[in-house]
Image (tube, grey):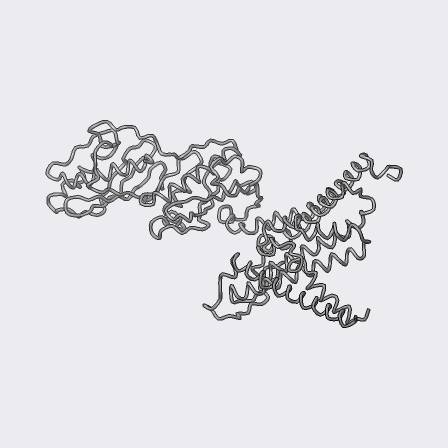
Amino acid sequence: MSETTRKENFFTRLLTDNPVFGLYLGICSTLAITTNINNAIGMGVAVTVVLTLSNILVSAVRDITPDDIHIPVYIVIIATLVTIVGMLMQAYTPSLYSALGAFIDLIVVNCIILGRAEAFASMNPIGPSAKDGLLMGISYTVSLIAMSLVRQILGTGILSFSNPFTNQEIFALRLIPKGFEIPMFSSQVGAFLTFACLAAAIAAYKNSLAAKEKAKTKGAK
Amino acid sequence: MKNLNKDSAVYKMLLLGIVCGVCGLLLSGANSLTAPLIEQNKLATIKEKLELIFPGGDFSDVTDQYIALDETGLVDGIYEAKDKGYIFTLHGTGYNSDGFTFITGFDNDGKIAGFKAIEQKETDGIGSRCFTDGGEYEQLMLTLTTADPIPLLSGATLTSTAIQKGMDAAKTVFGGITGGAVVPSGPKENTAAAEGTLGAEDFSANEPYCTVWTNTDKPEYVYKCTAKGFEGTNQALVTVNKDEGKIVAIEVTEFNDTEGVGDAAVAEAELARYAGLTLDQTIDATSGASLTSASLRAMAAAALEAAAGN
């Protein structure tokens, strides 16, 4: 596979297999925490780490785990990883930890993680499982960033990012003049609206890809 | 494990046990690595406030350990200042329905070591007087111990009642931790005053109003009182022995009644009659100056009642 095709494949998968907008997984935390980029990146990194490590571990124990106890084994592994990530965040990025609140602990029940453990890692070797976890994690992070970009800019008029370790502001750009921002986007209603629009855009892209594929097959016939 | 059948119950139990054991080990490792930092972070957010109570203290968060001692739900946090005492963060609702948060501490002898607002939006000049930095209420608090009832501040009853409740909750927890004596401040039983006594007289027409002025010489409290007389409102400083519920002295600081008539009631000899007066006793009006005298007697009664915590 050439470098360009591989890149194209990566971006296509990022959009079509996107866990949030493509598979509608992990929506609860997506709607709740995407009020700013800091939260989105923090949550995205936490989920990516847990997803990649859980995929690796689940894949490593897949041959020795009997079918009827595989769910408890996976849950114990995932819960341990989430608790450790939560402890590390509480210790090193306390402001981010308090901003994300209960949603860090709720990563345990994030459908993406158990979904990938069950659907992919339990049937594939460690290497591909790690890659799948990483890709899914990145897709999830990209979705969160997209949502938070829209919500933060429209809701507050400012695009800002601060260092989660020191809480120091790195940049803050006012993109919408004061008084013209739409605070609704910072609330739950804005979350649903943004989600619906982005999900519709991804669905439209997927449909256009499918139509192209169909036309190609027809042409080949 | 090789000889065990994968489908046997023993194998499954063993596997689950091993997975749980390994995960437990990992968790304990992560916990020992992060616990001190987490503790530090928790304290960092409040340390500035804790320093106000015990400057330079070595603080540790003991909320989880002792919060069960609080039955009111008003205590938010409990912090130990090593070898100094305990600090409490509390909340209450006074006049503003948003409520307020404040911090207080007791040293190891049970003395109130500090009292400060953390966040409050009480009415400026009324409820907010309870939280004035270095103000009369704070100064008064610093003279008290866990064995004293917390007084109310006249004119800021709603705010100071909420503070009183919070302080009582903190005192109870402190008593539970140290085993020390605690006296709740709850409103004293209103024993019906005998007819004809100062406590039974109705001075509402004089509109008496007292605030704690100073408390330099415990148990003597000086109250700054005002009450309407014949022409205007008179003002006096009434010193009360709180333990005995007696007036020590009364000094008129502002006289606004008729010169030559009302001033008979504020003559030195007349004022001397108030010394030793309690709510159970009777004090006659000064003849010829009965309205000014009523204003003085109203202030005396109000100061005694304020001292009694009613």
Seen from this angle, which residue lies furthest front?
A221
| Residue B280, placed above or below residue B107 | above
Residue placed furthest toward the right: B3
Q: Residue furthest top?
A: B194
Q: Residue at x 49, y 44 (%)?
A: B89
Q: Nearer the viewer, residue B287 or A66?
A: A66
Left or right placement of residue B292 versus residue B136 in this view: left
On the picture, is A166 further left or further right than B14? Answer: left
- Horizontally, residue B190 falls left or right of residue A16, namely left
Give A43 or B114, whichever is nearer the viewer: A43
**Which of the image's four quarters has the C terminus of chain A?**
bottom right
> In percent of the image, x 42 and y 33: which residue is there?
B184
Q: Position of residue A152 (x, y in %)?
A: 55, 63
**Residue in the foreground of this view, choosing between B302 and A193:** A193
- Residue that appears at 41% across and 44% down: B93
Residue B134 in the image, given as x and y percentages of width and height = 40, 49
